[in-house]
Amino acid sequence: MATNIGNLDIGLVVGFIGGIVAFFQGFRSYRVARFLQDTPETPIRSIAMGFVRIHGKAKSDQFVTSPVTHTPCCYYIVQIAKWKELKDSGAYSSDEPRGPRGLWMPHGADADGVWFYLEDATGHVMVDPHGAAYELDMTGTREVGSLGPSSFATGGVSERELLAYVARVGATPLSMMPRVVPGLGPLMAEMQQSQTQMQQRLEAQGPQSDPRAEELRLAYIELSKLPLSDSKYGPMSSRVANLQERNRRLGVLSTVARPQPKPPSTDVAAPVASPPAANPPLAADPPFSSDQPIASGRYQLTEYCILPDHDYDISGTCAENPAAKDLNDRNLIRKGKDEPTYFISSQGCEKINAGMQRGSMLMIYGGAIVGVFCLGLLLLRFGLL
């Protein structure tokens, strides 16, 4: 019988509470999934006031510039994670890392954009993208650190600018962070191509004079041979990160650098409709300044965008547009007051329905299993079972 409460007991309590929360959150997600499934897609010209589901292309003649990839877009979201070292992640005693020594923890988030039109063959409607849950394609990711060179530094926005951006955004409470479900979309093919190019470049470099730099080069080559869907990709990526961190601490210079996926093409067609004058102001460039203080530590910035001339499925409330120019511009899609469900996705209708159902079932059954398992272990440890 356990007489003292240790870290294991605290972990089991946290696991039990987390399982219960996931269980009930799964039912809420299932309700939303069923609600969306029962809402038929409506041509834009035929939408009425209330909750609607529409599909079309994003159109606008005003854009904001995304902070990470400098992509002109209608709306962007940047999620910032901070690297937290584990308590036992002291100095390396050997050249071979012994598993992950830290993890990425949510730190902050930033979102900005303009109202845009969603257009199909029947017409167009104004969309206010703020306050939705998003399932968008990732447009880029960067890893930056104040202690050494970034593993993703390949031009464009400098590391100092991104660290100043992180400092300006600051820490964001989890409850205030935008809900984003990553949709890899065309980035998967881009990443595969970048991996092939990286493998060819590293093999052409030949062996490094420093054995620790050579170990990192060989690890990168092994990582580049793995497809992104391979179960070994995650552990191998962690090993590469550990080797990088070790070399950074020891001052080992290396020409090895992970590739940065190129941002999506910005060659967009001319929009057919202009947003109203009441649009939020256009931000021509990200709010960077060399005079701003920079954040300390190691950060990972992941960017998602609503891109012009791309297809989106939007489920939200149709309300009156307060800045309508004419009768064809009288509607506005936004987050409703009575029905808060608001979802913007770059995936098709069938993929959205299937994905939401799988996610809700995973939370329901997974949360129940984790909760019961942790509760059972707690009762066993305290002799109550």
Image: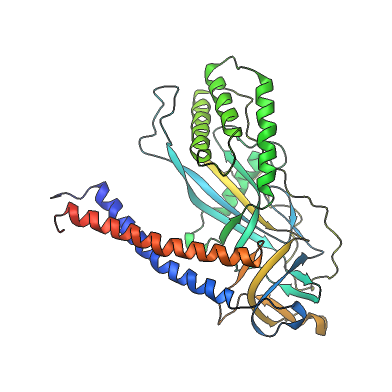
Q: Residue visible at 18% across and 52% down? A: 381
The x and y percentages for residue 99 are 42, 34
Q: Is residue 297 visible?
A: no
Left/right placement of residue 18 relative to residue 131 reads: left
Q: Residue visible at 24% across and 57% down? A: 376
Give the residue furthest to the top. Answer: 209
The x and y percentages for residue 140 are 66, 47
Q: Viewer-proximal residue, 307 or 41?
A: 41
In the rendered view, tell whether residue 364 sits above or below residue 72.
below
Q: Residue visible at 53% across and 30% down? A: 244
Q: Viewer-proximal residue, 329 or 215?
A: 215
In the rendered view, tell whether residue 223 sits above or below residue 65.
above
Q: Residue visible at 57% across and 80% down? A: 337
Location of residue 35 by image quarter: bottom right
Location of residue 299 by image quarter: top right
Q: Viewer-proximal residue, 169 or 302?
A: 302
Q: In the rendered view of the protein, which quadrant contains the C terminus?
A: bottom left
